[in-house]
Amino acid sequence: MSEGAYLINIPGVPSYVTYSWLATGILVGLALLVRRSLKMIPKGVQNFVEVIIEALYNLCEDVIGHHWARAHFPLIATLGLYILLCNYMGLIPGFDSPTANINTTAACAIPVFFATHYYGIRVHGIKYINHFLGPVRNIFALPLMLIMLFVETIGHLVRPVTLSVRLFGNMMAKHILLGVLAVLAPLGAPILVLGLGVLVGLVQAFVFVLLSAMYLAGAVEEAH
């Protein structure tokens, strides 16, 4: 879809930025709406939001552990809700999916990279280096330790690249497929792809937050 075909256009602002702002506004507005109508017995929008939040918190507890779940939950929940909404925005005719642009997915992946090492250093201090030196750490294993340090460093630097490219690639492929089928195929085919797009959007958001939680869990655990 061309830039001018979107329902919302701001001159000089790329569509993925415009719809990123829209997604942020929707989430903030939804949070304020739920906050103003909190009840002991949830119903309506509050009930729907609580189900999603509880699922994300349980994911943090299962992957990171009870002790650190509360500390990492705000980051994981924010990423999960934002990515899921951005993924689904691309299914609405005239809307753009911000996660179909590498700039958006990189902006989500880079904070995970910095948070991982921030918490690793905060918890372990200088001993955090042990996570990069492999299972054997003594003077006789120095060559192996140096090799492991190099390999682990490359592996950690690649993490934000793989996180961002995986999400971007899947969303872009879905975006292109929907555009082609909308032009070439009968009405039924795009509807089927839209159903598949709903599943892909959910799975990709889940994979992103699951990997992010695993990286954070690896940073705060003791190196063995």
Image (cartoon, helix red, strand yellow):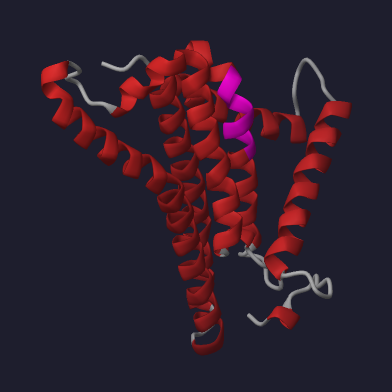
Q: Which residues are magenta?
A: 71-78
Q: Is residue 27 left or right of residue 80?
A: right
- Answer above or below: position of 79 versus 97: above
Give the residue furthest to the top: 67
Nearest the eye: 185 or 136: 136
**Residue 74 on the magenta span:** yes
- Answer above or below: position of 137 versus 56: above
From where the camera sits, is residue 95 visible? no
Give the residue furthest to the bottom: 184
Q: Quadrant of residue 19?
A: bottom right
Q: Position of residue 180 (x, y in %)?
A: 50, 83
The mark total stands at: 0
Nearest the eye: 78 or 52: 78
User: Which residue lies at the image location 47% right of the left edge and 15% below the top edge?
Assistant: 125
Q: Position of residue 18 (x, y in %)?
A: 76, 63
User: Which residue lies at the image location 31% right of the left edge and 17% below the top edge?
Assistant: 223
Q: Quick one: quadrant of the C terminus? A: top left
User: Which residue lies at the image location 40% right of the left edge and 20% below the top edge?
Assistant: 128
The main secondary structure of the magenta stretch is: helix
Nearest the eye: 170 or 129: 129
Q: Position of residue 139 (x, y in %)?
A: 16, 17
Q: Quick one: quadrant of the N terminus? A: bottom right
User: Which residue lies at the image location 70% right of the left edge and 29% below the top edge?
Assistant: 47
**Residue 26 on the magenta span:** no
